[in-house]
Amino acid sequence: MIRPWTDALARMRGRIARTAASMTAGFPHFADPATGAWTTSPAGDWTGGFWNGMLWLAARYGDDPRSRAWAAEWTARLAPRADSDTVFRGFLFYYGAALGWLLCGDAAARDVALAGAHGLAASYNPRAEALPLGAAAEEASDVGAGEANVDTVQASALLLWAHRETGDAVLRDIALRHAARHIEFCLREDGSVCQSASFDPASGRMLRRYTHKGITDDSTWARAQAWGILGWTLTHAWSGEARFRDAAERAADWW
């Protein structure tokens, strides 16, 4: 018998509640597939925003009165990350804080998300027309001011949301340039995605393309392809610009 999707949703809400109730500090990062035991990170690493996002979804669509308080608590824990030197602030503050405002109208979450967006925008390199990975970026073989990867296209969504909230045109400009430059960095002619690129911070010139989680630099890592589809789709959704829809469609067609 096929179970209705509502059963799966109920199980997910239950897992979220059990996880939140069991956490006294830190953020759940990944779990043992055999036992379900969590490995945590003290400040959220690059995945903390996804956890917060699940809490905000549970608060909006669930029936556990604790969810809203948990979501607010973990969002406050994310706030110090606004100054972290990592482009993955896009993940942290879009899912982890902006969703709190979008789904639940939480003003404190909005403030945290805007702080994250402005901190992220401050790292923009106008010569490269991109937000670099940053020295504190996680899950990358090479980090710093001259590295980029397709995972980070999603950061444009945070900046475009922040532009809508504040009217700051600089945020929109950075977001669009960043997403467009990553089409050049990461989207191949056949629609496959190259995960990473190095560039000269002084000139912005691309130096190499590579796939550090693939078998070779010319290979396609499955999650990189998915990151590209997500990032350009969100950029199109927030900007309405067809070039990003076209990039997402090329990547999806290859998939």
Image (cartoon, rainbow, N blue to C red):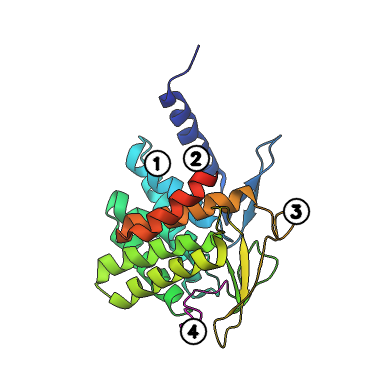
Mark seen at residue 215? 3
> Could you say where residue 54 lies in the image, as x and y percent from the top left?
45, 46
Q: Position of residue 106 (x, y in %)?
A: 30, 56
| Mark 2 vs mark 1, CA separation in Å | 8 Å
Q: Kindly identify the residue that appears in the image at 48 percent across and 62 percent down.
A: 153
First of labels 1, 4 by sequence position? 1
Badge 3 element = loop
Residue pictured at 48% horizontal, 70% vertical:
181
Give whichever of discs 2 and 1 has the lower sequence position.
2
Q: Where residue 110 appears, x then y in whole percent?
A: 32, 63
In the picture, measured across the screen, residue 137 lies left or right of residue 167, that is right
- Residue type, mark 1 in image: Ala
Q: In terms of image quadrants, where is residue 197?
A: bottom right
Which is in the foreground here, disc 1 or disc 4? 4
Residue type, label 3: Ile
Identify the residue position indicated by label 4 in the image: 127
Q: Quadrant of residue 162?
A: bottom left
Q: Would residue 107 be visible to someone looking at this image?
A: yes
Marked residue nearer the N-terminal end (3 or 2): 2
- In-front residue for pair 223/76: 223
What label sits on residue 138 in the rendered view? none
> What label does residue 58 carry, if any?
1
Residue at point 58%, 56% (across, down)? 193
Q: CA distance from mark 2 to mark 4?
A: 43 Å
The secondary structure type at the circle numbered 1 is helix
Q: Are marks 2 and 1 in contact (CB under 8 Å)?
A: yes
Find numbered disc 2 in the image and state the secondary structure of the residue it sits on. helix
For the residue carrying disc 4, how many other residues have a C-alpha within 10 Å: few (<14), some (14-19), or many (20+)?
few
Residue indicated by mark 2: 16
State the SS at label 4.
Answer: loop
